[in-house]
Image (cartoon, coloured by chain):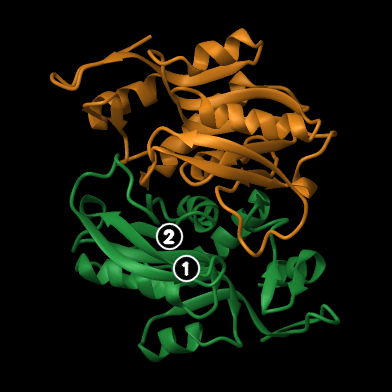
Chain colours: A green, B orange
Amino acid sequence: MQLLEERIRRDGIVKPGNVLKVDSFLNHQMDVELFQEMGKEFRKLFPSEKINKILTIEASGIGIACITAQFFNAPVVFAKKSQSINLDGEQYTTKIESFTHKRVYDVIVAKKFLGKDDHVLIIDDFLANGCAVAGLIDLVSSAGAVIEGVGIAIEKGFQEGGKLLRRKGIRVESLAIVESMDAETGEITFR
Amino acid sequence: MQLLEERIRRDGIVKPGNVLKVDSFLNHQMDVELFQEMGKEFRKLFPSEKINKILTIEASGIGIACITAQFFNAPVVFAKKSQSINLDGEQYTTKIESFTHKRVYDVIVAKKFLGKDDHVLIIDDFLANGCAVAGLIDLVSSAGAVIEGVGIAIEKGFQEGGKLLRRKGIRVESLAIVESMDAETGEITFR
């Protein structure tokens, strides 16, 4: 998606350790107009009328998922990273290792919000090693729901996540795939 | 806001300990169509053209803030509950005690996303004792930005948060104010 690639080139900052900072428009400050264009693009990429639920994970996936959901007329469910006293029902649970925070989270979705009649589109801001998406797929599978696909804003094409998911037959569509990036020059090459 | 009150009456569940579960439409599964109506209402309540930024806190405020931001043509900034390696710049910090999670969080906003030229509308899903909103106001004040107001989905009118904020001269608009609720009968009375 050209608009997103241009924005990453303009405002993204490459940091050592394969970190791409896009916090000025994607995951700390959020450019909602850009999200609308991304949402329209996800709708084009996933035109299936069967999709009735958008699944994401807190926190940075929620904004993109909500704006995108408007183009699917579907509710969003976000997986939660820790148990709160407000979640006392039965839950699907999995564990996800966070690249950004260098730790493992217990991740949960209440069973009542994901079931065998659901056709789920997973949305997230980043795909790197694929741990977050793999965890969300695990939750969907536990529920017996159908995974219609995975929509990602930015995929780090030089990490394994995308390849591993596609090899399993899961349809992954990333709006921008970074082929390589250089922390010294700041250069970003897209696939 | 009648639509929201009706939805709370229909799908909200009152639990012991002053807990109102609205996770089927507000803060776990999210009804984006309802959020659109809430966003329109916030725009009516805060018509100021000066508002150029929506501030919220992860995780459950993000969805409402993003949908609402569309009616303000403004970006959303969400305060983060813990430091990540992607946030290496200068930050405004505060501490917020969570009613739901019974713990104190360090909460941060990168300085580059909040400054003295900003006119900020704070958006959150719940207002109870007011700790989260007070923390967000602290961040806005640290930045020298102007607080245009606070927009809340559900205020627990029987707790002190709303009263304390309004007493300080802050304009707080809550789309639904719960006057009382009864965990035994499930009855909810709105102000």
Spot occupied by residue B168 in the image (x, y as percentages of width and height): 64, 11
Q: As displayed, is residue A132 above or below residue B129? A: below
Pick out the residue farthest to the left: B184
Q: Which quarter of the rendering shows the N terminus of chain A? A: bottom right
For disc 1, the neighbor class at 10 Å (few under 14, some 14 to 19, many from 20) is few
Q: Residue at x 55, y 59 (%)?
A: A39
- Tag 1, which secondary structure? strand
- Of marks 1 and 2, which one's residue comes earlier in the chain? 2
- Tag 2, which secondary structure? strand
Q: Amino acid at mark 2?
A: Thr
For disc 2, the neighbor class at 10 Å (few under 14, some 14 to 19, many from 20) is many
Residue A50 appears in view: no
Q: Quadrant of residue B96?
A: top right
Query: Of circles 1 and 2, which is in front?
Result: 1
Q: Quadrant of residue A179?
A: bottom right
- What residue is pinned by disc 2? A56
Q: Residue at x 38, y 26 (%)?
A: B4
Q: Nearer the viewer, residue A170 or B158?
A: B158
Q: As displayed, is residue A83 above or below residue B2? A: below
Spot occupied by residue A141 in the image (x, y as percentages of width and height): 24, 71
Pick out the residue farthest to the bottom: A167
- What residue is pinned by disc 1? A103
Q: Which quarter of the rendering shows the C terminus of chain A? A: bottom right
Tell me if A78 is positioned left or right of B113 in this view: left
Q: As displayed, is residue B142 above or below residue A21? A: above
